Each structure stands twice: as structure tokens, then as C-alpha cells.
């Protein structure tokens, strides 16, 4: 084992190419973090900048037709870019099932999991990854994830791992009504009266769901679970377990706020696509996940996106109010490719779309 930990190439092969992931490395009970995972200081979260007594808004959606709920959603999207929701209508049993399914997938032996590595997967829509983009990450992040791009039920039934497929699909289906309610609230402030077939396609025309696994880490302060970044989605619906570790940067500030897990809640954040389409009214905010020295952590984000073939820019209804466009029109697939060409680096992806 000593030679494995000291040889970066061998270690990367073990973790990235053989399906062991950081979970397999963690299970070797290593005492110190290999150099491959030690992040530069500027990439780690400075805990002295965490504001202890602040939190992102928590919104009760039990009466989502109430205009005050819609206003609260829009206010949170403008001022925080992040909020938690309770009484959201997604059954707790389905949430528990998808959490269990995530654990089941990552409990599979490496020889089974490695079937879903990009080089082995029978479809480009399903891939198992360690870190963010191990091909370009100089220092790896302490995370394994299975990413599934939804095309159709038939495609999912053919290619998604059977050990978690049914629960993930059920969770996706039960989240769709919630996603529509959130978008219906958000577009009203953009002078769009309702979600119709045309704007629905560009706002939520494609979806990707990730199963994230963050195993116990020997030196969590030296690495990151996920480096600081903003999402490229329209919005993201995040299910996290009770472990905690997600931090959100306060708007126009160097301070960070922890997002404590609330049982049964979901965390919503605005993505770059909606910041662009709202011409900067709604904020896509940098966020960061720390590694944990005591507990394994899982999370399940649904990324609600435009279709890859869509051209996105400030929506006409927003520009018709007399606003100057802050962003140009960009092909969404080009924007996403730009995001995946580089390691996580704060909010820099959005510069790709700035006028």
C-alpha cells in the first residue's frame, strides 16, 4: 500500500481508472492524505470566513399558490441564489429510497462500478467519475459521483445501473411538479405570465441527476469535497443527507454560510443559465463542499437545464423592460463544454457569456 500512496500515477489508476474511487482509498484506512488530493490553500474553504449565525432562507411550500410564497422564492433567488424548501410535495419515502439507492450503488464492488466509467459505459449519458474532471484536475477532489443524463425511460431502463435505476427515476418523476412550481414563481418576476411549451423547453428541456459520494477523509482540512463553483443549470434541486458540509458564498462578499441539513427539506439554487436568462436579476452563487473526517456523506442533485441545442441569453421579456443586455446569446452546449474544460474555479464560467 505504501508504494501505491507514493506513486501518483499508480494511485490515480487505482482511484480513477479501476473503479475504486476515493471510497476505495478511504476504505484502505489511510492515515494521511496523498499529495494527489492536497489542494492549494486558495482552493480550500477558509473557515475563518464562515459566518456562524446566518443561514439561507427556508421557505414553506405547503401553500405554493399563495403569492407570498412566490415572492419569497423570487426574493431568495435575487438576494441569496440559494434557499431551502420544506413541505415541497416530494414524498419523504421516495427521498429515503433514493438515498438508500445511492448507498447501494457505491457499495458495489469496483469491478461492477467500473462498467460505468466513461471509457467502459455503453452510453455517453451515464458515467462514473472521481473528482470533477480527473483528466484536467491537477489536484483531485474527494468525491465519487455517478452522473445520469435523462433521455427517456427506455434509455434509462437499458443503461442506468439496475441497483439504483428505479428509485432515481421515481425521484425524478416526483420532482417534476415541484420544479414547475418553482419556475412558475420565478418567471413571474421576469414578466412571463406562465410556463408554456416554449419557455418550458428552454428552462427545463433537459435534466441530469448525479449520485454523489463523499467518503471519510483522513485530512479533510487539506482537500475539498467539491471546489468553489456555480452550477451551469437553470436551477438545481439538491437532496443532501444529515451530514452537512455545503457552504454558500454570500452575495457580493467574501463570507460563507453553512447550509445545515433539515430533515425532509430540499435545497434549491439558481444556476448560470437562469442568471443569464434573467439578465442578472437572479444570482447563480458560488458554493463549496468540505470533506469530512468522521462520516461518509451523500447528496443527490437534479440539474434542471436548457436543452443542449438551445441558444440562451437574456429573455426578450426582460430586455423589453428597457434593460441593457449583460450577456450575449450563447449555444447552451458550448457553455457547458466550457465549464467541463477546466477545474472548478469559482464563478469564472459565466465570463464566457458576458457582453
Image (spheres, rainbow, N blue to C red):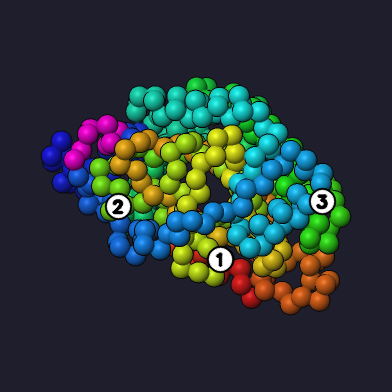
Q: Is residue 336 magenta?
A: no
| Residue wearing tag 3 | 67
Q: Is residue 341 above or below residue 21?
A: below
| Residue 124 in the image: above or below residue 191 | above
Determine which residue is flagged by label 2. 221
Residue 24 occupies which quadrant of the picture?
top left
The image quarter in which residue 192 lies: bottom right
| Secondary structure type for disc 2 | helix
Q: How many residues crowd around disc 3 within 10 Å: few (fewer than 14), some, or many (20 or more)?
A: few
Q: Quadrant of the N terminus?
A: top left
Identify the image quadrant of the C terminus: bottom right
Q: Which residues are magenta?
A: 24-31
Is residue 49 something one can see in this rendering?
Answer: yes
Within 10 angstroms of label 2, few (less than 14), some, or many (20 or more) residues? some
Residue topped by disc 1: 251
The image quadrant of residue 214 is top left
Residue occupying the point 66% across, 62% down: 78
The number of numbered discs placed on residues in the rendered structure image is 3
Amino acid at each position: 500500500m505504501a508504494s501505491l500512496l507514493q506513486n501518483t500515477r499508480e494511485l490515480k489508476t487505482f482511484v480513477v481508472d479501476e473503479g475504486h474511487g476515493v471510497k476505495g482509498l478511504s476504505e484502505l484506512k489511510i492515515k494521511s492524505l496523498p499529495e494527489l488530493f492536497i489542494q492549494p490553500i486558495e482552493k480550500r474553504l477558509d473557515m475563518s470566513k464562515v459566518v456562524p449565525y446566518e443561514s439561507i432562507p427556508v421557505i414553506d411550500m405547503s401553500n405554493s399558490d399563495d403569492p407570498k410564497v412566490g415572492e419569497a422564492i423570487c426574493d431568495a433567488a435575487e438576494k441569496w441564489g440559494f434557499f431551502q424548501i420544506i413541505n415541497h410535495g416530494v414524498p419523504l419515502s421516495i427521498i429515503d429510497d433514493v438515498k438508500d439507492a445511492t448507498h447501494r450503488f457505491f457499495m458495489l464492488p469496483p469491478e461492477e462500478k467500473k462498467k460505468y466509467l466513461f471509457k467502459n459505459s455503453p452510453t455517453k449519458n451515464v458515467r462514473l467519475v472521481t473528482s470533477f474532471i480527473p483528466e484536467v484536475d491537477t489536484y483531485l477532489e474527494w468525491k465519487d459521483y455517478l452522473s445520469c443524463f435523462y433521455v427517456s425511460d427506455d434509455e434509462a431502463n437499458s443503461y442506468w445501473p439496475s441497483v439504483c435505476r428505479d428509485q432515481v427515476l421515481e425521484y425524478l418523476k416526483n420532482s417534476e411538479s415541484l420544479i414547475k412550481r418553482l419556475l412558475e414563481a420565478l418567471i413571474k418576476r421576469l414578466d412571463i405570465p406562465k410556463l408554456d411549451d416554449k419557455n418550458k423547453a428552454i428552462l427545463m428541456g433537459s435534466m441530469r441527476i448525479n449520485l454523489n459520494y463523499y467518503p471519510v477523509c483522513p485530512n479533510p482540512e487539506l482537500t475539498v469535497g467539491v471546489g468553489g463553483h456555480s452550477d451551469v443549470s437553470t436551477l438545481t434541486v439538491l437532496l443532501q443527507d444529515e451530514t452537512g458540509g455545503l457552504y454558500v458564498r454570500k452575495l457580493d462578499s467574501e463570507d460563507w454560510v453553512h447550509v445545515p441539513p433539515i430533515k425532509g427539506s430540499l435545497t434549491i439554487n439558481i444556476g448560470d443559465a437562469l442568471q443569464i436568462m434573467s439578465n442578472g436579476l437572479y444570482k447563480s452563487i458560488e458554493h463549496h463542499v468540505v470533506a469530512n473526517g468522521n462520516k461518509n456523506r451523500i447528496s443527490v442533485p437534479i440539474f434542471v437545464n436548457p436543452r443542449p441545442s438551445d441558444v440562451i441569453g437574456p429573455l426578450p421579456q426582460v430586455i423589453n423592460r428597457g434593460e441593457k443586455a449583460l450577456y450575449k446569446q450563447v449555444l447552451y452546449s458550448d457553455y457547458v463544454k466550457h465549464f467541463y474544460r477546466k477545474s472548478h474555479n469559482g464563478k469564472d464560467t459565466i465570463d464566457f457569456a458576458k457582453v
